[in-house]
Amino acid sequence: MFSKSLITLTLFFAISLMISFSESVRSGNNEYPMDWPQVIYTSDFNNDLSSDLAVVSGLNNSAILLNNGSGDFTNLGSSYTGTMQRDIDGADFDGDGNLDLAFALWNFDYVAVRAGNGDGTFQSPVLYTLEGDLSRPPGLCIADFDGDDDDDIIVTENYYHVARFLSNDGDGTFTVGPSYATGFSPWGIAAADLDGDDDIDLAVALTGGDMSIMLNNGDGSFASPVGYPGGGGSNWIVAANLDGDTDIDVVMTTANTDSIAVYLNHSNGTFAPATMYQADSHPKSIIAADLDDDGDQEIITGNLGAGNISIFYNPGSGNLMPALNYNVGHGPWGIAGDDFDDDGDTDLAVTLSEDNMVRILQNDGTGTLYICGDANGDGTVNVADAVYLISYIFKGGPPPYSMEAADANADGDVNVGDVVYVIAYVFSGGPAPQCP
């Protein structure tokens, strides 16, 4: 083991730094400052095969963060799109090989489309007017709904209780088409083939607590909604195959009960009653992603009121495990998942609306998400992590939450060098932790 002199020297160095400098809160290498970030979307915006980020701000701007290929991002700056952007999605609308973006603008009662230039920049928004004043569009989704081989847009109109179809004319311009009843007060919307007929159907979260299913007639028109009870305060919804069969299931956040509602598909577009799983305070966002690389989709929520995310690991049956909550910062609003650092597993990007930043959570390859330097797994990097490492290294204390997170200096080992590195970062302005 370690000699008493080495332990004494390390502790003396640590205490000296702590006495000399006050603890500070600093942005790390996986944190990107941004004013009031909310909704987030990921795709490849500059055709370099790396997943970039588009972030919508509550200050009516949107920002593009380009990935350098290893999970480090460059903020290209913000540009105005419209007031109160509630949702964002993307596709190649005009067939030029570049990713374009669509935004739901709550205050303007518009859908905004911004054509991509292929280098991570986007053209000025083209606005499409919805039904009229107070349409209040909170959610949108993109798919080829009418079977003509280009991607269309469907947007929920909260005030009029409908979903509006915007048909792609084939060149990336849209015709605002008919609306279809959703049920009372629609919010989030997801697109998937729910009944196995190769047409793209809709699942809609209704803020009163129900979920509605709208089956596609095959031409981009939709049958009357079929409602399924859920919990109160439904906002966002995701479609994914949870139980390993051949059909797509649906999961919805229910903020009033701090839960998620899971609806398993009977393989024909009808669904079993909701199974409820407890998240944490005010689940705001939801995604599905295979975090542990077992072929099954986990469910992840951002819990706005709790400052954490809930991860519901999936054993493959669709019966999710109880939530594992991980602190990420204040006001987690949006989540996006992809392999940002190109190591073969799915990482997460989380918008922290109260901390004014986007934070990247790395995956250690087993499905555990972590913040680099956060040895004790409390969601922050501070003096407690140094103390935790000292206890583990010198006194046989419990192992770090993630060994990758604890390897702050990225030398491939967890040792006294990581203690020194974390202390220097927290107290004396040293470099941010650089985990492998």
Image (cartoon, helix red, strand yellow):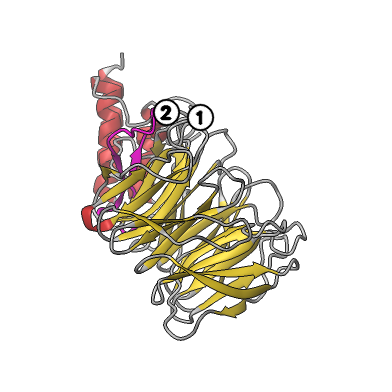
Q: How far apart are marks 2 and 1 (CA)?
A: 8 Å
Q: Residue 47 versus residue 384: which sits nearer the camera?
A: 47
* Residue nearer the viewer, 74 or 197: 197
User: Which image quarter is the N terminus in?
Assistant: top left
Q: Is residue 75 magenta?
A: no
Q: In this view, does 40 lie above or below 270?
A: below
Given the current orientation, which residue lies at the most extreme right position?
96
* Residue that carries the numbered disc 1 in the rendered image: 295
Q: What residue is shown at x 40% (from left), y 33% (from top)?
A: 368
Q: Is the magenta stretch mostly helix, strand or loop?
A: loop
Percent position of residue 343, x then y: 57, 34
Residue 315: percent from the left, percent from the top? 38, 27
- Given the current orientation, which residue lies at the most extreme bottom position? 133
Dot 2 lies on which element?
A: loop
Nearer to us in this view, 35 or 155: 155
In the rendered structure, which amino acid carries the disc numbered 2?
Gly
Whether residue 431 is visible: no
Helix, strand or loop at label 1? It is: loop
The residue identified by callout 2 is: 316
Tag 2–tag 1 contact (CB < 8 Å): yes
Horizontal side of residue 288 vs 375, given as left or right: right
**Badge 2: residue crowd in 10 Å (few <14, some 14–19, many ≥20):** some
Q: Position of residue 377 (x, y in %)?
A: 30, 38
Q: What stretch is highlighted in magenta?
A: 306-333
Residue drawn 43% across the image and 38% down it:
266
Label of residue 48 in the image:
none
> Residue at 57% of width from left, 57% of height from top?
217
Give the answer, above or below, for where 284 lies relative to 376.
Answer: below
Q: Give the label, 2 or 1, closer to the camera.
A: 2
- Indicate whether 31 appears above or below 278: below
